[in-house]
Amino acid sequence: MIRLVLRKLGSTVVVMAVVAVVVFLLIHLSPGDPAAIIAGERATTADIEHIRTSLGLDQPLIVQFGLWIGRLLQGDLGVSLFSNVPVATLVASRIEPSLSIALVTTVFAVLTAIPLGILAAWYVGRWVDRLIMAIAIAAFSFPIFLIGYALVWGLALKLRWLPVQGFTPLENGIVEDFRHLILPSLSLGLVYMALLTRMTRSTMIEVLGEDFIRTARAKGLNPSAVMLRHALKNAAVPIVTTIGSGIALLIGGVVVTESVFAIPGIGRLTIDAVTQRDYPVIQGVILLSSLTYVLLNLAVDLSYQLFDPRIRS
Amino acid sequence: MRTRGFAGLAMALALAAGPSLCALPAQAAPPAAMPDKLPAAKVLKAVVNSDLKILDPTWTTTYITIRYGYLVYDTLFALNTKFEAKPQMVESYTVSPDAMSYRFTLRPGLKWSDGTPVTAADCVASLTRWSKRNSMGQSMTAAMDGGFEAFDDRSFGLKLKHPFGLVLNALAGAEAPAFMMPARIANLPIDQQITDPTGSGPFIFRKDIWQPGHRAVFDRNPDYVPRSDPADYLSGGKMAKVDRVEWLYMPDNNTALAALQAGEIDYFESPPLDFIGLMKSDPDLKVLTISELGVQMMARPNALYPPFDNWKARQALLYLNNQSDSMQAVMGDPSLYMAKCPAYFMCHSENETAAGSQPFIKQDFAKAKQLFAEAGYKGEPIVVLLPTDRPQYAAATTVLIDEMRKAGLNIDIQALDWATISSRRAQKTPPNKGGWNLFVTSAGGPDVASPLANIWFNSGCELANAGWACDKELVGMVGKWAAEADPAKRHAMIDAIQTRAYESVPYVNLGQYVQPIAFRANVKGVLAAGVPVYWNIEKK
C-alpha cells in the first residue's frame, strides 16, 4: 500500500513538471500582451513599453521561464501582474466558494443519482426506468448556463425564494451560505447527476444479471439487501470512478456557474486571468488544478481497495 | 504583502482553511475602520463595468482606475456642467496678467486618510508624477519654465516659458485628472506601481477586505472636508451620504440585471442596452444618462502601410462611413445615439463644429472607389481586426467591413479577443506579417472633446498612438490652440483644426452614443457628472 502511494506520488512529480513546462509555453506563445491591457485603452505605445519593461516581460522567454521555475521550486507561485497580489493569496481567497459549490454539487448528485440509477435498474424496461432516463437525458442535454438562467428566473426573480447571485462565507452563517449555494449547485449538479444516474443504472443492470445475485435471491434475501449489500457493492468501482472523473466535469462547469451566479471562485479567477493574460495567475491556477486532479485520481485508485478485495490482494 | 516560500503554496492548498482566507491580508486600514459588515441601508452596492485591479491612476489609463481615483483622491480643480475648471482642493488662485505664472492656495484643514495634513509639497509631488504620464500634463510641463514649486505649506505654483492656455483644464481633466496623493507615495519612481491607497477623497479604500476580481469596498472618509457649494458635475461639495460604497464585478450582465431587479444591488453602471426599455418600464428602477457627451466610436487606420498611408484612402473611409447604420448596429435604441455627429471633438461639447465635414455627409461608394484607386489600391488584402469579446466594437466593425466590401475592397478579417487586439495593434510590422490595417475602438466624450486630450487625434507620427497618424501641420495647429489663453480665440481656431483633420483623417468618427446607468428607485441624488461618481448619493 505504502509502496503504491509512493510510486503514484513519484509519477505525480513527473506529471507536474510536464504540466509546468507545457502551461508556461502555451500561455507565453499565445498572442496577447498583458502590458497593453494594463496600460489601458488610452495609453501610448511608449507607455506600454514602459510597463512591459517594468514587469520584465521584455526579457527572453527562457529567462522568464527560469525565473518562474526558480520561484516555483521555492513554493512561490508569483504575483499577479495586475493587482500585485500574490497568486497564492488570490487562490486561497477563492477556494472556499469553489470548494463549497463542488461539495454541495457532489453531495446532491450522489444522493439523487445513485437511488435513481438503482431504481431504473430494478425496473429496467418499465415506465419508471424510461422516466428516469428521460430526466437524465434532458439534464445532460441542457447547457449549464441555460439551466442557471431558468433557475434564477423561476426561483429567485419570480418566487423570491433564493438569492440571484453571490456567495456568503460560512462564517456569516450556514443558512445564508447554503441559500447562496442552492442555485449554482443545482444548475451544475443536474449534469453530474444525469451522468452518474446513467452509469449507476448500466452497472447495476450488469451486476444484477450475475450468478451470485441469482443465488442471493434464491436464498430468499429481501430485495433491498440484494440491491444494497450485494449488487451495489459490486457495482461500486465504476461508480466511484465516475464520481472521481466527474470532478473534472465540475472543474469545467464551475467556470460557467461562477460567472452566471457572480461567485468569486477559482473558475472566475481563471477566466479573468486568461482574458487579461495575467501569466502568473494562469500558471498558478492551472498547476494547482492539475495537482488537485492528480491527487483526486490517486484517492480514487486507493478507494478501489475498499470495495474490491481482488484489487487489495 | 508578498507571500513567499512553501507557506504561500501551502496556504493555497489549504482547502479546508475556510472563510478566514476570503479576505486579503491587512494592508492599509483607515485610522478608524468601519466594521466589515454594515446595515444594508448604509451601503450602496454597485456593479461596475470592469474589475478594479490596478490602484495607480498614473500607471494605467483604464476607466475603472480613474473611477477609483475619484472616490479615493481629490483634485485641485474640477469641471462643472459648463466644462469650466472650478477650484476643488484649491481655495484660491491667481494668474499673472500675462498668464505665464500661476499660484494656488489649498483650502485649510485638508487631510490624508492616514491623518496627516495635505501640504503644497504633496501637491507638487503629485503633479510631477501625473505630468510624466498624462498627455495634457506632458504638454503643460513642456511649456513650463522649471517644475512645480511649493511656496509654503499651503501655496504652490508654476511658471510658463511658452504660453499654455489650458493649465486649469489640464488639472481638472475629467477622464484623467491630476489626483493628489501624499508626497511619500507620489515620489515613487514612475515605473513603480502605487499600491498604497492613501488619499484625501470623500471615501477610503478598504484594501484589507479587497477581493480583486470580485469586490472593492470604499468607506466614507470621516476626515473629508467637502466644499460648501453644491455638487455640480465633478465640482462642488462631494458629500458622502452613504457609509459605504461596495463595488461588485459581475462578468455576466444578465445576472447583474436580475440582481438589480431583485434588489440585491442598488446601482448598475453599464446595464445591457437590450434591456433599457424593460428597465424604464419597471417602477422599481430608474435609468439615467450621466453624460450628455457620451462616447465616440472610431475606426483607426494604420498610417504606416498602404492603402491607409495615403490620405486619399483614409478620406475614402469617410465616404463609406454611415454613422446612423453603425450606431443602429451598436446601440439599437435610437434614443441612445445621434444619427449624425460630424464633430471630431464631440457634439454638445464646447469644441463642437461641423467644419470640414460637408463633403462627407452623404455616403458615396463611387467616390470612395475613386479615391482608393487614386491612392494606388489594387485589391491587396486589408487586415481588419474584429474583436470577438466586445459586442459593440464587433457590431461597428462588421458594418464597416460590409461598407468596405461594397466599395470593392478585399478584406482580411482577423477575429481575435480584445486582449490579443490590444497587443497586436501596437505592432508596427506589415499587415501580412502580424500587423494590421484597421480596427475599431471608442473613447469617453470628455477625453475626445479636446484636441490635446484626444489621444487618437494626436498626429505626431512616431509619438502618436497605434495607427501612427502623421500630420505635422495638424500637430502645429493643435499646439497653437493649446497655447492660446483666451477661450473665445481658442474656439475660433477649432474650425481650422477640424477642417485639416477631415483632410488628413487621423481616424473616422463612427458615431456618438450614450451609455445610461440604472439604479433602484430608492437611490437618490445620482449626479450626471459625465463619469459615475458616488458622492451625493443616498438610499431612502
Image: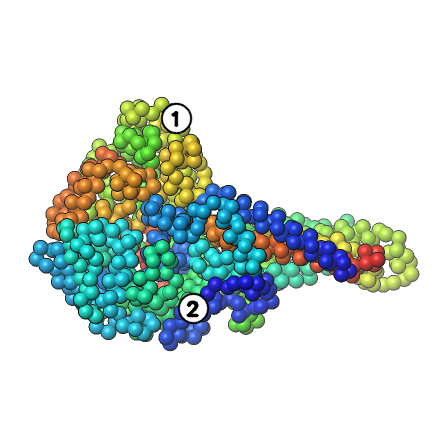
Please state the horizontal and vertical placement of residue A279, each as a whole percent of the image: 49, 51
Q: Amino acid at mark 1?
A: Glu
Residue drawn at x 58%, y 68% as measured from the top left: B17
Identify the disc placed on residue B331: none
Image spot of residue B88 (x, y percent) = 22, 64
Q: CA distance from mark 1 to mark 2?
A: 56 Å
Q: How many marks?
A: 2
Q: Chain of mark 2?
A: B
Residue ID at (42%, 66%)? B207
Q: Residue at x 45, y 44 (%)?
A: A32
Horizontal side of residue B51 vs B481, given as left or right: right
Residue type, numbered disc 2: Gln
What kind of element bears circle 2? Answer: loop
Mark 1 neighbour class, 10 Å CA radius: few under 14, some 14 to 19, many 20 or more:
few
Q: Please, which chain is the residue tagged with disc 1 on?
A: B
Residue tagged 1: B380
Q: Percent x, y for residue B354?
A: 20, 40
Q: Position of residue B70 (x, y in %)?
A: 31, 62
Observer-nearest of B124 and A283 = B124
Q: Nearer the viewer, residue B242 or B50?
A: B50
Q: Is residue A66 left or right of residue A310?
A: left
Image-quadrant location for residue B116: bottom left
Q: In the displayed structure, does residue B214 sit left or right of residue B291? A: right
Query: Which image quadrant is residue B467 in?
Result: top left
Which residue is painted at 22% across and 69% down in the image? B227
Is residue A165 visible in the rendered image? The answer is: no
Looking at this view, is B540 or A231 the one in front? A231
Could you tell me which secondary element the residue under label 1 belongs to? loop
Relative to B237, say whether A23 is above or below: above
Q: Nearer the viewer, residue A263 or A165?
A: A263
Picture disc at residue B27: 2
Q: Is residue B253 visible?
A: yes
